[in-house]
Image (tube, helix red, strand yellow):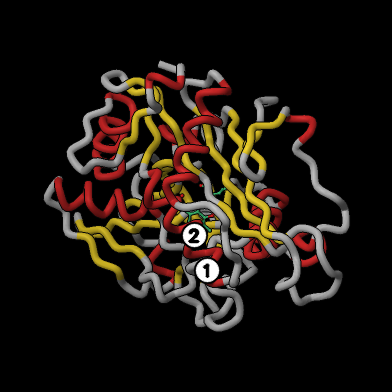
């Protein structure tokens, strides 16, 4: 866990990557961030999954919050590769975060610094070691996703996760692994840190981006892989009770990858274990990230010159 962290342009020792308690972000949640994975692929060695798309989302999140990141996309990508190479990790989770730092106190962040950090660490199965095979038990959260025109859902902003944390705590403290949040109209949005897919009659459905979800990069990859396999995928408004009568349900996300859901609110989903379409999609996804077969150009190998592979 204690790898050097890229902080405003250079790698610094883990212990030195600190901020002042009066940083704007601590008081007002003014940060945007990403979660990215680097996989040690069989054919290409360590390679980052959809680095460009993640960095584009980071830059867009920052733009929404009027933060000017003083680095180009290319510089952020190079910095990511340097941080990975320096860590010596062959597979890792990558966390870029851009935040409002020191300047003035008060809500207005426009006079505060924009600081940029990239950290890496080893992160295993997000929803537990058995989750990818056995599936997880989840509940519909008593907390809703933020309404449109409150917090922008397309921005992956730190402050959004105070809502996600309420849903996650509500789930784990009542004996579930994760909470599914509805939007403020009561339609299915997503998990606290994952998008959600519903399988019914051999077809896949997922909430449209306008329903206050994060436009997940794994979600996009799964839509592509499902269509490659010949499945129909539709973005559709999903009522809560559709979860109870679905054939299969699964989460997608960088951290969660593709995690099957075996029950919701104590209703058994399908046969109560990973379904065949979920399994086929996991296999297609793992073929890319573990083997390194990359028909869609999603992998960026960590440059050999940097020294990991
Ligand atoms: N919705 C939310 C709310 C979300 O946080 C994530 C990622 C996704 C969907 C899936 O997006 P993508 O990773 O682009 O497929 N959540 C990140 C943070 C999790 C955390 O606990 O921190 C992640 O998976 O990296």
**Which image quadrant: the N terminus?**
top right
Q: Circle 1 sits on which residue?
A: 63
Q: Nearer the viewer, residue 94 or 280?
A: 94
Residue 225 appears in the figure: yes
Residue 272 appears in the figure: no
Residue 290 on image: x %, y %: 33, 26
* Gap in angstroms between the C-alphas marked 1 and 2: 6 Å
Q: Nearer the viewer, residue 80 or 129?
A: 80
The crowd level at tag 2 (other Cα within 10 Å; few <14, some 14-19, many 20+) is many
Q: Is residue 62 left or right of residue 74?
A: right
> Which residue is painted at 81% across and 64% down in the image?
103
Residue 102 on image: x %, y %: 80, 59
Q: Nearer the viewer, residue 30 or 114?
A: 114
> Which residue is painted at 41% across and 49% down in the image?
252
Q: Is residue 273 left or right of residue 92?
A: left
- Does the CB distance between marks 1 and 2 fall below 8 Å? yes
Q: Which quadrant of the view contains residue 127?
A: top right
> Which residue is painted at 64% across and 69% down in the image?
143
Q: Is residue 280 left or right of residue 40?
A: left
Q: Tell me: is circle 1 under 8 Å from ligand 1.
A: no
Q: Is residue 285 left or right of residue 268?
A: left
> Which residue is painted at 40% across and 27% down in the image?
302
Vertical arrangement, residue 306 with respect to residue 185, above or below: above
Q: Circle 2 sits on which residue?
A: 59
Residue 21 on image: x %, y %: 87, 53
- Secondary structure of residue under mark 1: helix
Q: Which quadrant of the view contains residue 111?
A: bottom right
- Secondary structure of residue under mark 2: helix
Residue 121 on image: x %, y %: 60, 30
């Amino acid at each position: 866990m204690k790898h050097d962290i890229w902080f405003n342009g250079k790698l610094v020792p883990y212990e030195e990557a600190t901020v002042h308690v009066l940083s704007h972000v601590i008081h007002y949640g003014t940060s945007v961030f990403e979660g990215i994975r680097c996989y040690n692929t069989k054919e290409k060695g360590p390679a980052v999954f959809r680095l460009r798309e993640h960095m584009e989302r980071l830059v867009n999140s920052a733009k929404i919050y009027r933060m000017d990141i003083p680095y180009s996309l290319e510089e952020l990508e190079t910095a990511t590769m340097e941080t990975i190479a320096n860590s010596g990790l062959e597979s890792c989770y990558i966390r870029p975060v851009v935040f409002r730092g020191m300047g003035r106190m008060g809500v207005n962040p426009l006079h505060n610094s924009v600081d940029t950090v990239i950290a890496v660490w080893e992160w295993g199965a997000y929803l537990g070691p058995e989750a990818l095979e056995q599936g997880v038990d989840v509940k519909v959260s008593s907390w809703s996703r933020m309404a449109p025109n409150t917090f922008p859902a397309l921005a992956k902003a730190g402050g959004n996760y105070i809502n996600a944390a309420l849903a996650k705590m509500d789930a784990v403290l009542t004996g579930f692994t994760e909470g599914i949040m509805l939007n403020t109209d009561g339609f299915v949005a997503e998990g606290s840190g994952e998008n959600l897919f519903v399988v019914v009659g051999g077809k896949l459905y997922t909430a449209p981006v306008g329903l206050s979800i994060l436009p997940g990069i794994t979600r996009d990859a799964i839509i592509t892989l499902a269509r490659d396999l010949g499945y129909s995928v539709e973005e559709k408004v999903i009522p809560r009770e559709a979860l109870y009568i679905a054939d299969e349900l699964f989460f997608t996300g960088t951290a969660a990858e593709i995690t099957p859901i075996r029950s919701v609110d104590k209703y058994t989903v399908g046969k109560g274990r990973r379904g065949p379409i979920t399994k086929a999609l996991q296999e297609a996804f793992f073929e890319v990230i573990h083997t390194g077969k990359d028909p869609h150009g999603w992998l960026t190998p960590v440059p050999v010159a940097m020294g990991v592979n």
